[in-house]
Amino acid sequence: MNTIAANLDTIWILLTAFMVFFMQAGFAMVETGFTRAKNSVNILMKNLVDFCVGSILFFLVGYGLMFGRDAGGFIGTSNFTLSITGNLDTSVFSFWIFQAVFAATAATIVSGTVSERIKFKNYLIYSIFITAIIYPVAGHWIWGGGWLADLGMIDFAGSTVVHSVGGWAGLAGAIALGPRFGKYNKDGSSNAITGHNIPLAALGVFILWFGWYGFNPGSTLSASSPAIPTIAVATTLSAASSSLATMLFTWIKYKKPDASMTLNGALAGLVGITAGCALVSPYSAIIIGILCGIIVSISIEILDKKLRIDDPVGAVSVHGVCGFSGTLFVGLFAQSEYAGLAGFEGVNGLFFGGGWDLLLIQLTGALSVFAWTFGTMLLVFLLIKKTVGLRVSRETELKGLDIDEHGMEAYSGFQIFQND
């Protein structure tokens, strides 16, 4: 029976890992749809190649830093290249592929925030740093037995480990690059630079939503976990309520239900529930989704119009801000009846009699990961900017990165009219 259970767990982990891998297609479609046609090839290349680069680096270095023998609560110091010997432990291989696709998710989030203006070859330098060092160190603190794990922080499927890391790295990249030409006027007002294919973006959101059923339930790492159904329900309800909240918020504010914002609202709800999907009730999941739908709407407007940070796809707000918020929501909405199904016995948030302790731990962890990720990635982007250069020329940006950077067009032979 133990062999059967172990084999089922392996199948479950691999199946959900493959679903998470398919999220790369979702990110590619969302980012392509939300940006202009002249940069589509560049978007697709970044999403493909950062996974390829990231997989190799996570195999050689990142996995060991994240899950190796703990050194002072900060980094791992073993299991580099999986420490492959003649005695193969296939369970390690299945766990590695599951973690590798999570690392790739964090890395590819940044592609959207820096889109339409970053040099492709130097984007690859960023990919090396985040998958080899930045993401694994943050992951070790929480998932690898590091100091935040010892403190008691809970991030079940990665609102902070994956999504906030990607969001804060993207924020650093957007700041280092500066806004796209034509985004802001001399008086500081913002111009909308609309995406060229909303149907493609919608397809990407549906793919991502599907992949999230691997992301969240798969994090049980067990096919027999009683928490799998409750996790799937919480994931669904949070995404649905968040999308509706965003739609209503923009409908009231702008007199029209905005499609692109509503799509991002679904993603915000998915990100926000990821940390606590195994610890909250369906009712709490709906509340979390509503809050994330409102938060992402306000955050996108503040970044765009107040802070003048140009994030073409809203990834900083979706992944960074809602990932941060979702991590805090664990400290508010965790409920022992549901948490116990996933092995978190007796865990309750503030709203269910658990006191302030867990919320403060969650806040400490979320702030620490922000400081680490944003600080180090801003340094990396600025070093690239000062040495080999970060941004394409004005001429290339106006023409589109596809032609100058890749020598081709995504829609060759078609005439596409757009205001560039």
Image (cartoon, rainbow, N blue to C red):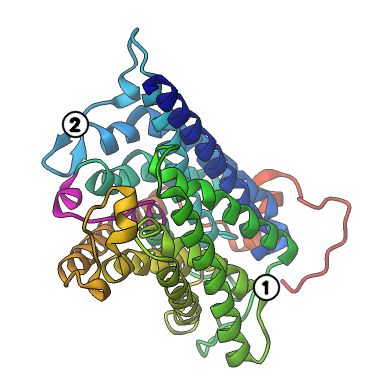
Give the residue number, with chain letter if any, for mark 1. 194
> Label 2 neighbourhood size at 10 Å, few (<14), some (14-19), many (20+)?
some
Residue at the far left: name it.
72
The residue positioned 16% from the left and 72% from the top of the image is: 355
Residue 288 drawn at (x, y percent): 42, 72
Whether residues under marks 2 and 1 lie with C-beta atoms below 8 angstroms apart, the answer is: no
Q: Which mark is residue 41?
A: none
Which element is circle 1 on? loop
Quarter of the image that includes the N terminus? top left
Residue 375: in magenta span: no
* Residue 128 location, quadrant: top left
Q: CA distance from mark 2 to mark 1?
A: 48 Å
Residue 136: quarter of image: top left
393 lies above or below 147: below
Give yes or no for residue 148 being in the magenta stretch.
Answer: yes
Residue at far top of view: 86
In the picture shown, does residue 409 fall above or below 317? above
> Which type of secondary structure does the marked residue at label 2 adopt?
loop
In percent of the image, x 34 and y 51: which residue is there?
Answer: 341
Is disc 1 surrounded by few (<14), some (14 to 19) or many (20+) residues within 10 Å?
A: some
Q: State the extent of the magenta-drawn residues as a range.
A: 146-163
Quarter of the image containing the C terminus? bottom right
Between residue 412 and residue 5, name the one nearer to us.
5
**Residue 378 image offset from top left, x and y in percent:** 34, 58
| First in residue order: circle 2 vs circle 1 | 2
> Could you tell me residue 33's position as x and y percent?
68, 61
Q: Amino acid at mark 2?
A: Arg
Q: Is residue 417 left or right of residue 276?
A: right
Residue type at the position of mark 1? Thr
Which residue was labeled with disc 2? 69
Residue 3 against residue 152 in the figure, above or below: above
Q: Which residue is nearer to you in this view: 138 or 39?
A: 138
